[in-house]
Image (cartoon, rainbow, N blue to C red):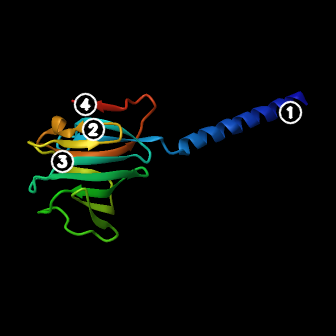
Amino acid sequence: MPDARKRASLLLLVLLTGSFLAAQSLAEPEARVLDVRDTRSRALLLSVRLPLDERFYFRYTHSTAKTEVEEHFKVVGREAIVLERMIYASGGAGIPDSAPAGATFRVADGRFVLDGINKRFPSLERIRVAYFYPFILGTREAEHRLSDLARGRLVDVLIRPQAGEDDRRSQRYD
């Protein structure tokens, strides 16, 4: 009888351990990482940890209108970046003058706001970082000056799962 009890206990332990490991591997990681890479060289310029359901934004000066623009994004699932909102101060070439289907247009604090854009991207590619003006990638925790990292260059913003708990919150790569 003791051998049967030991075998049953061992079997139960193996099953519980297996269930725990399977659940861990199926669980969604607790964070994503935004990687900013030079489009041409593919060099990693910046890596920013982004907790689940956290949003990020770009703030930059529009190349023709010469006014500030903000684009607000969220990460959905494992690989989608969704443009949720755009805020800008003036119209012009390349700046929307009406809301796309499903979005709303309003004026707030003297600026135009497009909410509910919900345009999905697998990544944000070939973004020109202005030479003369600041270009910010911001999160709730910090603002990162892409203009200091990639002035006048094209960059790509990619999303990936966080590799492990020992990752740093944000890391600059030269």
Q: Which numbered disc, 4 or 2, marks the residue closer to the eye? A: 2
Q: Amino acid at mark 3?
A: Tyr
Front residue of 167/92: it is 92
The residue that label 1 is drawn on is 4
Q: Quadrant of the C terminus?
A: top left
Q: Which residue extends farthest bottom? A: 101
The residue that label 4 is drawn on is 173
* Residue at 88% across, 28% down: 2
Sort mark 4 into few (<14), some (14-19) or many (20+) by Cα contacts within 10 Å: few
Front residue of 96/154: it is 96
Residue 60: mark in rendering: 3
Q: Earlier in the sequence, mark 1 or mark 3?
A: 1
**Circles 1, 3 touching at the beta carbon (< 8 Å):** no
Front residue of 89/128: it is 89
Q: Looking at the picture, does residue 127 appear above or below residue 84? A: above
x and y percentages locating residue 105 in the rendered image = 28, 66
Q: Which residue extends farthest right? A: 1
Classify residue 7 by image quadrant: top right
Q: Amino acid at mark 2?
A: Glu
> For the residues marked 1 and 2, what is the alpha-carbon distance in whole angstroms?
62 Å
Q: Earlier in the sequence, mark 4 or mark 1?
A: 1
Classify residue 64 by image quadrant: bottom left
The residue that label 2 is drawn on is 143
**Circles 4, 2 touching at the beta carbon (< 8 Å):** no
Q: Earlier in the sequence, mark 4 or mark 3?
A: 3
Q: Earlier in the sequence, mark 3 or mark 2?
A: 3
Is 75 positioned to the left or the right of 42 in the image?
Answer: right
Q: Helix, strand, or loop for circle 2? A: strand
Q: Amino acid at mark 4?
A: Tyr
